Amino acid sequence: MKWNQIFAQLTLLAQLGLSLAMPILMCLAGCYMLCTRLGVGLWIYLPGMILGIGASFMTAYKVYLSVTGKEKKPERGENERNFNRHL
């Protein structure tokens, strides 16, 4: 294996790790701010954690689709007008 392929795979792995961790951390930080500034109870951490996990799975799925190239692209119909084709 060449070094550029190894670094590309490591970069992809780091991006996947960050896309899994950041939504959870951001939701927990939002819950912390709600608890400290607005005085909301500690129960807010449960929905925040659930939303964070759901968001991290969604971003991981999007990364998977972009890496594998299985993302569906919209197909253009015959009757659809383009900017250079009017009729």
Image (cartoon, grey):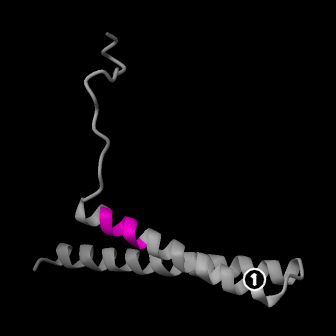
Which quadrant does the C terminus fall into? top left
Q: Say left or right for 39 vs 52.
A: right
Give the residue pinned by disc 1: 44
Q: Quick one: which residue is furthest to the bottom in this view?
A: 42
- The residue carrying pointer 1 sits among few (fewer than 14), some (14 to 19) or many (20 or more) residues within 10 Å by Cα, namely some
Going 79% across and 79% down the picture, which residue do you hit?
33
Q: Is residue 69 above or below residue 78?
A: below
Q: Is residue 63 above or below residue 33?
A: above
> Which of the two residues, 79 or 73, is positioned nearer the viewer here?
79
Residue 44, magenta (yes or no):
no
What element does badge 1 sit on? helix
Image quarter of the N terminus: bottom left
Q: Give the side of residue 28 with respect to residue 22, left or right.
A: right
Q: What residue is drawn where x is 33% and y is 75%?
A: 11
Q: Outermost residue, top direction?
A: 87
Q: Residue at x 89, y 82 (%)?
A: 39
Q: Identify the residue at image location x=31%, y=61%.
A: 66
Secondary structure mainly formed by the magenta segment: helix
Task: Look at the picture and state if 87 lies above or below 35.
Answer: above
Q: How many marks?
A: 1
- Give the residue type that dot 1 points to: Ile
Q: In x, y percent, where is residue 3?
A: 17, 78
The residue closer to the viewer here, 9 or 85, is 85
Q: Position of residue 60 (x, y in %)?
A: 40, 73
How far across and down, in percent of the image, does residue 12 sit?
Answer: 32, 74
The region drawn magenta spans: 60-65
Query: Which quadrant of the structure image shows residue 23?
Result: bottom right
